[in-house]
Amino acid sequence: MKDLVSTALDFMEGVDYGDARLVQIQEQQITVRDGKVERIQVSESLGMGIRILDHGFWGFYATHDLSVANIAEAVKQAKAIAQASRIAGGRPLQLAEVDPVQDTYVTPHQVDPFAVPLDQKIELLLKTDEILRQGKHIVNRELQLRFVKRYQVFGSTEGTLIEQTIVESGGGYHVFAFRDGILVRRSYPAAHGGNMQRKGYEFIEEMDFLSHAPHVVEEAEALLKAPPAPEGVMDLVIHHSQMVLQIHESVGHPLELDRVLGWEAGYAGESFATLDKLDTFQYGSPLMNITSDSTLPGGLGTYGYDDDGVPAQRVYLIQEGILRGYLSSRDTAPFIGRKSVGAARAQDWSRMPIVRMTNVNLEPGEMTLEELIDGVKDGLFIMTNKSWSIDQRRLNFQFATEIGWRIRNGKLAEMVRTPIYSGITPVFWRSMDGVANDWYLWGIQNCGKGEPSQAMHTGHGTPSARFRNVRVGSVRD
């Protein structure tokens, strides 16, 4: 595989800059619905993406035909596209400096998930389903496991040659319960495909599907009897299972530098966190410390090097509430006079790298979750995302969760159904006055961005946190 990348680089003689990225992706997904194996999906893709920078303008061309003749043609096409981009005009790009490197990186893992027999994986899902089906009002059950192995070789005309193997494992399940016209969902460990980490099959064992299934059924049945969440303005304690989406949508996306620059506008909007705010803007309270950390073991945004060949690193994006940096790539970082933080990533060989989230984390505090709750006289404790909505500037948002509890005089009281809360991003984050020490690492498996669209896996480590005077309500049945 390295020879194919070297061959592509040989054809780039005389270009200002060029790189070749060969990517092979294996994926396995198993879905069980209502006691039956609904789908076993196995896929594999292999191809090469070629980038050429000509006088500051990109050209990109991808191919699945890896013959020498076709690789030469792909380089020729990338050159032609770069030249056409130059004719079209615009501001020429510069690449932030990076030291050439030759290296190999492999995700730390104990058990190769693709070596685990299919029957063993199906048996786990069916045994879990047997427990879930015991609920009197459970009307639908869905369980899944998902595994990904990504092998990649990246080489550039600057002398870089990097080989990486990334392994991911994850899954989860949910049930729907129905009674008297009320339909509720309860998920483990999270909705939207569960949780996923860059680990081997040992992560599936860590999640322990079987022991959590009775609790999922119990809460689903209890939600049918629970009243809707109250409406009004009150204090809010958010469990880390919901904080992951709050960070993703109202911090991660707004701090993507291509979005800030206006390059990413058509698909999912721009950002309110404009360049004039760097190093001065009070994004949140002094307790808000957000890092981009692509070195974090297990994170879906963890790797040895990004798709620009920039080493993984940990940097502050927000420090003590102040905006200190952006997620950047080699071609965006010069716009703020800095080096890339290593956030250029592509979905696969057929897509050009763009700025994507790494592991964007809220650093833990010193309080316990119980202490956060104890500091609330009248409020809500909520967990597990149900849905999200945010505007095209990443400013106004509304989230719904699967479950919540009323807090009365510092204690959890009655369960409430489908809470929602809304706010304005900086106002909301400035109201955070408590951060717990129950930090946990979550994975987002369906982050969409770009045209043509790219679905990316991103990570978020976060503790639970407390916010004051938040508008809350309930999803009505």
Image (tube, rainbow, N blue to C red):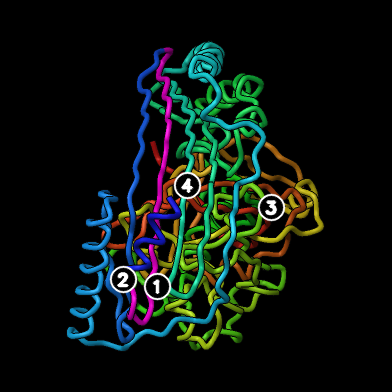
Earlier in the chain: of badge 2 and badge 3, it is 2
Cα–Cα gap, marks 4 and 3: 32 Å
Q: Position of residue 319 (x, y in %)?
A: 68, 74
At 42% from the left and 20% from the top, the residue drawn is 32
Earlier in the chain: of badge 4 and badge 3, it is 4
Q: Is residue 239 visible?
A: no
**Which label sits in the foreground, 4 or 3?**
4
At 53% from the left and 14% from the top, the residue drawn is 123
Earlier in the chain: of badge 1 and badge 2, it is 1
Q: Which residue is mark 2?
A: 265
Q: Is 349 situated above or below 450?
A: above
Disc 2 packing (10 Å; few <14; some 14–19; many ≥20): some
Q: Secondary structure at mark 3?
A: loop
In the drawing, what numbered circle is on residue 259? 1
The residues colored magenta run 12-35
Disc 4 packing (10 Å; few <14; some 14–19; many ≥20): some
Quarter holding residue 264: bottom left
Cα–Cα gap, marks 1 and 3: 27 Å
Q: Is residue 303 left or right of residue 143?
A: right
Give amino acid for label 2.
Answer: Ala
Closer to the camera in the image, 113 or 7:
7
Closer to the camera in the image, 321 or 256:
256
At 65% from the left and 44% from the top, the residue drawn is 108
Closer to the camera in the image, 333 or 443:
333
Q: Which residue is mark 3?
A: 463
C-beta proximity under 8 Å, tags 1 and 2: yes
Q: Which residue is mark 4?
A: 151
